Image (tube, grey):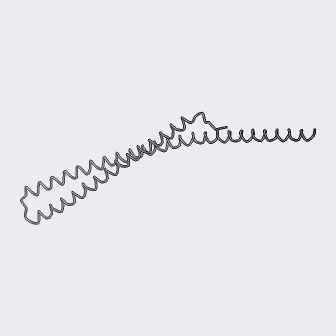
Amino acid sequence: MKFHYNFQKVVDLKGNEKTQAEWMLSSALGELQTQEKDLVELMELRNETLLALQAAAERRTPMAAIREMQDYVDYLDNCITRKQGEISQAHQEVSRKQENLNSKALDEKVWLKARDKALGIFQQNLNLREQNELDEMATVRFAMKSL
């Protein structure tokens, strides 16, 4: 006899949902890493611009050029602030995806345990049936010897 679990499609569905949740988390983590990389690049660009601004001030660069560089630093500051907000949102999204994955993994685990329990009962019944057949064969042999 072969074991057949009536709810195997549900178990498979729960496994697929968990896999999809893993992909979604992976995607959210990738987005977070991209946002963090962009922030580092913006901060490096800001630092380079500040160094250039300082050097320009020491070289007696025209005030209009210095003002233009300062405006660019201000623009970069705004970009950095915006990027930090995007990173905060990306962190929240990663947290939501992690919670979703945890929920899906727990759900799958419940169904897998139910299947394992059903398999255990099936095996126990199969062993009992085999033992009964062996007992019956032994009884028949004993009865044949008695005749």
Q: Residue at x 52, y 38 (%)?
A: 12
Residue at far top of view = 6
- Count of numbered circles in the view: 0
Which residue is nearer to you in this view: 85 or 103? Answer: 103
Horizontal side, residue 89 vs residue 109: left or right: left
Find the residue positioned furthest to the bottom.
58
Q: Residue at x 51, y 43 (%)?
A: 105
Quadrant for residue 121, please give it: top right
**Which quarter shows the C terminus?**
top right
In terms of depth relative to the viewer, which is nearer, 52 or 120?
120
Left-right relation of 2 to 90 = right
Which residue reaches farthest left? Answer: 62
Classify residue 97 as left or right of residue 86: right
Which quadrant of the figure contains the N terminus? top right
Image location of residue 40, percent across then percent down: 28, 56
Above or below, 43 relative to 146: below
Q: Residue at x 54, y 35 (%)?
A: 10
Give x and y (percent) for residue 51: 18, 63
> Is 125 in front, or is 59?
125
Residue 26 in the image, given as x and y percentages of width and height: 40, 47
Q: Residue at x 25, y 51 (%)?
A: 80
Q: Is residue 19 left or right of residue 147?
A: left
Q: Position of residue 126 (x, y in %)?
A: 71, 39
